[in-house]
Image (tube, grey):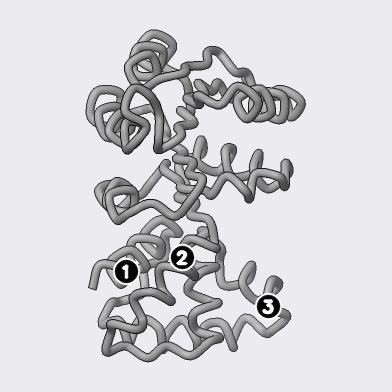
Amino acid sequence: MGQAIRVVVGEDNPLFQAGVVHVLEEAGLDVVAVANDATDLVRQVQAHRPDVALIDIKLPPDLTDDGLRAARELRSSAPTVRILLLSQLLADDLAIDLIGDRPGGVGYLLKDRIADAASFVDAVRRVAGGESVIDREIVVRLIGHRRRHSIDDLTAREREVLALMAEGQSNRGIARELFVTVSAVERHVTRIFTKLGLPPEPQSHRRVLAVLRFLHR
């Protein structure tokens, strides 16, 4: 068995923090430190150099975007540390910008999705492995919001496929999720990239980057 994934948790809500630590440790991950504010988070990550920093976007002292700003700092000062952002509500485009800067090994999840412990732990493991993980609800809501202001007109099925692409799913994985054939998914993907004016890329994080580019249009 390989070495356990090492995690620093940045979360100021004591109950949520305890729940996250419990879920991670039950799954065999090693929580090496917890931080209650953005300043301590940066200090703990730089001291422990974990595999993943789990960061609430809104941390003290200001409870605005302190966690997000700490994440941006860590992407520069500790580039080998993977980042998984957590948010109670859909945050602004700054979080998407962070992912778009260098999409490998960074993720963004809504807190209410963490109730599914298995999916949450899987997301942490995937980010630790260098993948990009974006909560499907975030992508769907962003696409829906921007679609009203966009010339693009993706079908409902194409939006579903796009959301699953953003999670890092392969065409085969999308086919299993939607109960369709792989060739059907390939046709959807081709049409999506055609409509977005973007060439398809084989790596999962580049598929995510294509989604992010669309969201910025």
Q: Is residue 1 visible?
A: no
The quarter of the rendered structure image containing the N terminus is top right
Is disc 1 in contact with disc 3, using a CB cutoff of under 8 Å? no
In this view, 206 is above or below 128: below
Farthest residue, direction front = 62
Q: Secondary structure at mark 3?
A: helix
In which image quadrant can residue 160 be found? bottom right
Residue identifier under label 2:
139
Q: Specify whether 112 is left or right of 55.
A: right
Name the residue that disc number 3 marks. 178
Q: Could you say where residue 3 lies in the image, as x and y percent from the top left?
A: 62, 19
Give left or right: position of 129 versus 98: right
Task: Give coordinates of residue 50: x percent, y percent.
Answer: 47, 20
Task: Indicate which disc residue 215 carries.
Answer: 1
Please report the residue visible at 37 percent of the width from the left and 32 percent of the height from the top: 63
Using the image, tell me which numbered label, if any, was put on residue 76: none
